[in-house]
């Protein structure tokens, strides 16, 4: 059983009697958490981007860039999915993380916040822990906000002409100077929707999301979950 699976033994039923004694049968339920799996997947996708870039370094733009775009997109989506899953797991275990909060109040707060933007969920957790809220203008929170913008741009993609960019330009501005964009595309091309696809970006995506969780765990004072996977999460992102 891996560290991200939580067994919960339960008594299923009492069956039969013999000399007045009940015979008990027990079953165990298993809950799987996916936040760590998403982060590990992001690392794997980032490594694939690095390998493709290394294999084609110095070559002109070609069909290989399609794979960079595919794996790069998968890395970005998985990085943010890891953060989303982590926030949800945090509130699913609200009795452990917020033991001083009455159950019905905790349940109502989660009902209200489950569909809120990702960073607002983390702010609520910090508020309940009576800790300072996220510093939106500082890293890694600022980087995660840009990463979410990239994820949203890819997930809800709307084509725009190169000379009439609006949302593409806004996303590009949020990503500017955060990583080295693709060397296979001309510098005159905007960062979004293609030039972001690089190992520079995927490395930044993984490091930003993992650093955000590590900082949150320290700031919130919750039991560290991600530290057990440090070696695997750092692998392939340097």
Image: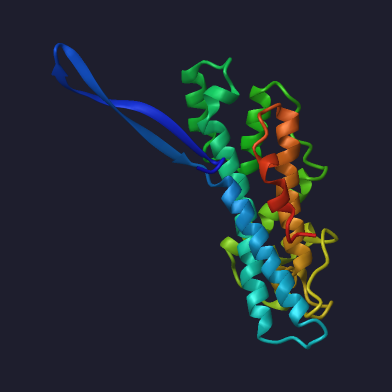
Taking the view exactly as shown, the residue that stands out farthest to the front is 19
Q: How many marks?
A: 0
Left or right side of 22 for 132: right
Q: Quadrant of residue 44?
A: bottom right
Q: Is residue 191 above or below residue 60?
A: above
Residue 107 in picture, x, y percent from top left: 48, 25
Residue in the foreground of this view, choosing between 161 and 185:
185
Image coordinates of residue 30 in percent, x first then y, are 42, 38
In the figure, 177 relative to 142: above or below?
below
Visual colour scheme: rainbow
Percent across and percent down for residue 104 are 46, 19
Residue shown at 80% from the left, 60% from the top: 238
Q: Is residue 133 visible?
A: no
Would you say residue 142 is visible in this rendering? Answer: yes
From the viewer's side, name the closer residue of 8 and 64: 8
Left or right of residue 24, residue 47 in this image: right
Residue 171, image x, y percentages = 72, 61
Q: Which residue does the image show at 51% across and 32% down from the upper left?
A: 92
Q: Residue 190 versus residue 2: which sits nearer the camera?
A: 2
Q: Residue at x 70, y 21 (%)?
A: 130
Above-or-below relation of 106 to 166: above
Residue at horizontal 63 percent and vertical 46 percent from the top: 83
């Amino acid at each position: 059983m891996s560290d991200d699976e939580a067994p919960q033994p339960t008594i299923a039923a009492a069956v039969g009697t013999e000399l007045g004694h009940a015979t008990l049968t027990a079953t165990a339920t298993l809950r799987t958490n996916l936040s760590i799996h998403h982060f590990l997947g992001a690392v794997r996708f980032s490594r694939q981007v690095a390998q493709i870039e290394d294999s084609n370094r110095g070559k002109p733009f070609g069909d290989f860039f399609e794979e960079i775009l595919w794996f790069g997109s998968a890395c970005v989506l998985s990085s943010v999915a890891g953060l989303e899953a982590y926030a949800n797991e945090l509130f699913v275990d609200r009795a452990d993380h917020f033991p001083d909060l009455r159950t019905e109040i905790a349940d109502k707060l989660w009902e209200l916040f489950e569909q809120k933007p990702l960073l607002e969920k983390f702010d609520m957790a910090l508020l309940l822990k009576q800790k300072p809220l996220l510093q939106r203008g500082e890293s890694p929170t600022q980087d995660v906000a840009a990463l979410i913008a990239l994820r949203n741009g890819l997930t809800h993609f709307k084509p725009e002409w190169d000379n009439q960019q609006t949302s593409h330009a806004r996303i590009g501005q949020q990503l500017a100077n955060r990583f080295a964009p693709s060397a296979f595309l001309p510098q005159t091309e905007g960062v979004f929707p293609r030039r972001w696809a690089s190992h520079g970006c995927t490395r930044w995506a993984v490091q930003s999301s993992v650093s955000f969780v590590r900082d949150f765990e320290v700031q919130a004072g919750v039991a560290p979950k991600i530290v057990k996977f440090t070696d695997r999460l750092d692998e392939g992102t340097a």
